[in-house]
Amino acid sequence: MIKIANLSFSYNKETPVLTGIKLEFDRRSTAIIGQNGAGKTTFVKLLKGLLKADEGEILIHDHNVNRKTAAQLARTIGLVFQNPNDQIFKRTVLDEVMFGPLNIKMDKQTAKEKAIEALKMVELDGKLEMNPHDLSLSEKKLLCIASVVAMETDIIIFDEPTIAQDHGGKEKIRQIIQALKDKNKLVMTIIHDMDFVAENFERTIVFTEGKVLLDGDTRYVFSQKELLETACVEAPGITKLAERLGFKDTVITVEEFINLKQTCSPPR
Amino acid sequence: MKRIVVEGLKYKYPLADSLALNDVTFDIKQGEFIGIIGKNLAGKSTLCQALVGLVPHFYKGAYGGKVFVGGLEVKNHSIADISLKVGMVFQNPFTQVTGSKMTVYEEIAFGLENIGVPRSEIIERIDSVLNLLKIEQVKDHNPFDLSGGQMQRMAIASIIAMKPDILVLDEPTSQLDPAGSEEVFQAIQSLSKQGITVILAEHKMEKIAQYCDRVLLLNNGKVVDFDTPGKVFSREDLEEKGVTAPVYTRVCKALGVKKAGTDEYPVTLEEAERVLRGDGA
Amino acid sequence: MKSISLYEEGTSFVHDVDPITKLWYIPFAILIPIILPLFTVSFLLIGLSLALLLAAKVIRKTIPVFGFVFLILITVVLIQGMFKPENETVLFQIGPLTMYKEGLLFALTITLRVINIIGAFMILVLTTKPSDLVEALVRKGMSPRIGYVVVSVFQIIPEMMATMSTITDAQRARGMETEGKLLVRIKAFLPLLGPVVLGSLINTKERAMALEVRGFNSQAPKTFLYEEKTYQFSKILQMGMLLLTVAAVVWRIFL
């Protein structure tokens, strides 16, 4: 779906932010991890056309991103920003979610339907007429997710969706990601929460100092202990525990761990 | 010696319909490292702010009960007075930068100038906290140019320089990457080892389990439990209160293995490893 | 981090002069030509200011400012030269336009005054760190709260500009067209103001709390990290300016 060749970018000449990125994306859900400053956010801004590459090209569905404005790309690729306060500006929850669909020229009736559908997904459909700023921070984040989901883009990118979310909030985000995957969309996220990565994403890409350090199945990536260390990334807790106990395979979820443990240890 | 005593604290924000804190009672001893957990809106931030006097002095609102910190009753003292006993670090490193100072060094001096510390002592204290929080190498940088982890450590340094003997932190690492969080936790732990009483609200349960002596579980403004991490995370009703136990606890719970001779599940990587090894894996 | 301050670091003796003395220089430079309305006096003062700016090696930074001011002054010269009611002595004519002596002389007075004022301000602004100036004023008894507001503006405005660009990106991301014709840009700009204002209100509240717990409202007498910046000749300079002003007044009244 997305093809990236030899992509480089810098804000000023002296310090390159990204150098020589070569990646291809299919429909596997993908987590982008790495330290702050590794270039993750810059990378998704380039995909979204919010920044223009110095070198290289990005093809989305065979269209060159460089030749389109961010607004034109909005039909194919959605991005949920990290801080909801940067995004919300309508007076009611419903208007906020309808803003994107109307911008990409959906008719009013369809836009409303899509908006309500997306709000149901995040369980905010009971608050259509509320002022978004009266919502709690975690509800605001969910609202921002809904306002991008309603645009029905083929690709949807999240920037740190789990920050400031408690157990319940994370659970909701997990369900949204699953629902998007079921609709055959490409879901991508920038994230620091490794347990969440292990449980929800098929593919993981590790960025470090503007380059791709590791790329592959999430399980494979978390098995590369030494490389992860150089990127200052830690494997999920359960992976570390399994490794300490001398499990042969890389374990990335609690369920796997329990299964393995129950099958290989003698019943007591 | 008790450093913090909270008795029947009730608090309602102005314009709110319900109590943010409802009959909260507990006490904390000198040098303890306390974690506060609970789902969003459970009252964690409000409780942190009640310990430094922002509740009620900054927000106003309806206030009942008593809070004593380091011998001062919060209700009867100004935030400036309380800030000499209790320091507070907030969630967002960015908004804690005063914006009126050009270097990290000057930024840390801000609080000390306000409370009238003599010049020679200001310099002494800054040098010592720069070292303690490991940010000497950026002391001449502009505060806004730091990374998130460095900025948050600068915020802690600015507070610690005021020599409070109690430190309250409200989700200090929620906006940081794993390496930045780790830096901050290490710094807090070294302060705790020096005898500073630490109260930390946090969502990262693995960290709470690893570092805290006791854990205060809040739900709907009420104290549900206040006990060791082992006891609190072994509760059966944890998920109902909106909290997920550390992954090590969850896995041991599912396998039904407890720490030898107790009724508790392991809460840290090391404990889980020990228990599961003993299990014959 | 960009700061919007125009301060230029330097090692000249102008930089060494304490901020209060430089502040004194502004009313001095404004008052003298008013008390003694002679062109010579104005020229002398302008010459002095320019010499100081040169000595501080900051004269280049004044060019855009003076350039902008000259643009406005040219219109003053033209309008006064042609249309001042007292105009009667014709100086010269270009086509249908007539320039009069009275108007031009008046315009010259205004021009000199403005250049003079700008020059005096530039010395202060270009050679003094804003925080040094405010700190000096706080030492003289200005409220530290006002001082804080003044200094923080220099850093917080650039920070707001950064937020503004994030917010623009967030709207572009949802398909709002912000590139292209002026009308498109204006239409795109207005909705951004809401989040910018709200965002800064939220930040202000958080920052206010952070300041509170750092003793911002402490009743204790404030101390300072840096020793007071003193200049060995500041008393002499300040007295000198005062004496010159008094002398000017005396001159005006008795001579």
Image (cartoon, rainbow, N blue to C red):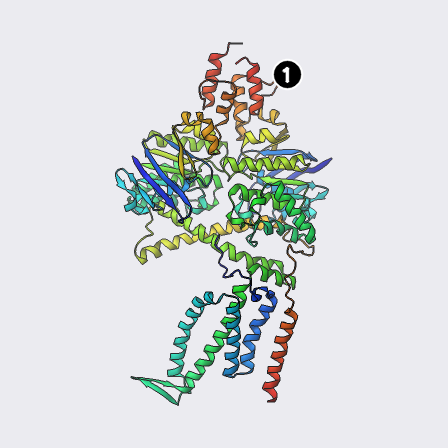
Decide: few, some or many residues near mark 1? Use Cα within 10 Å; few <14, some 14-19, many ≥20.
few
Asked if C154 appears above or below A211 in the picture, the reply is: below
- Which quadrant is home to the C terminus of chain C? bottom right
Q: Position of residue C59 (x, y in %)?
A: 48, 67
Position of residue A35 relative to residue C103, above or below, is above
Residue A101 in the figure: left or right of residue B170: left
Q: Which residue is mark 1?
A: B261
Residue C202 shows in the view: yes
Amino acid at pointer 1: Gly
Res B257 seen here = no
Q: Is residue C117 above or below residue B197?
A: below
Q: Position of residue C195 (x, y in %)?
A: 44, 50
Q: Which of the pair C233/C124 is nearer the observer?
A: C233
Residue B178 locus on image (x, y percent): 51, 35
Of residues B221 and B17, the one drawn nearer to the viewer in this rendering: B221
Left or right of residue C149, residue B25 in this image: right
Q: Is residue A26 left or right of residue C28?
A: left
Figure disc tally: 1
Q: Residue furthest left?
A: A62
- Residue at left offset 51%, top offset 79%: C42
- Residue at 56%, 62% (x, y): give it: C11
Instruction: Please report, as a chain letter, where disc 1 is located.
Output: B
- Write down the quadrant of residue B153 in the picture: top right
Residue positioned 55% across, 58% down in the render: C151
Q: Secondary structure at mark 1?
A: loop
Residue closest to the eye, C119 or A150? C119
Give the image location of residue B268, x and y in percent: 57, 25
Q: Residue at x 50, y 79 (%)?
A: C43
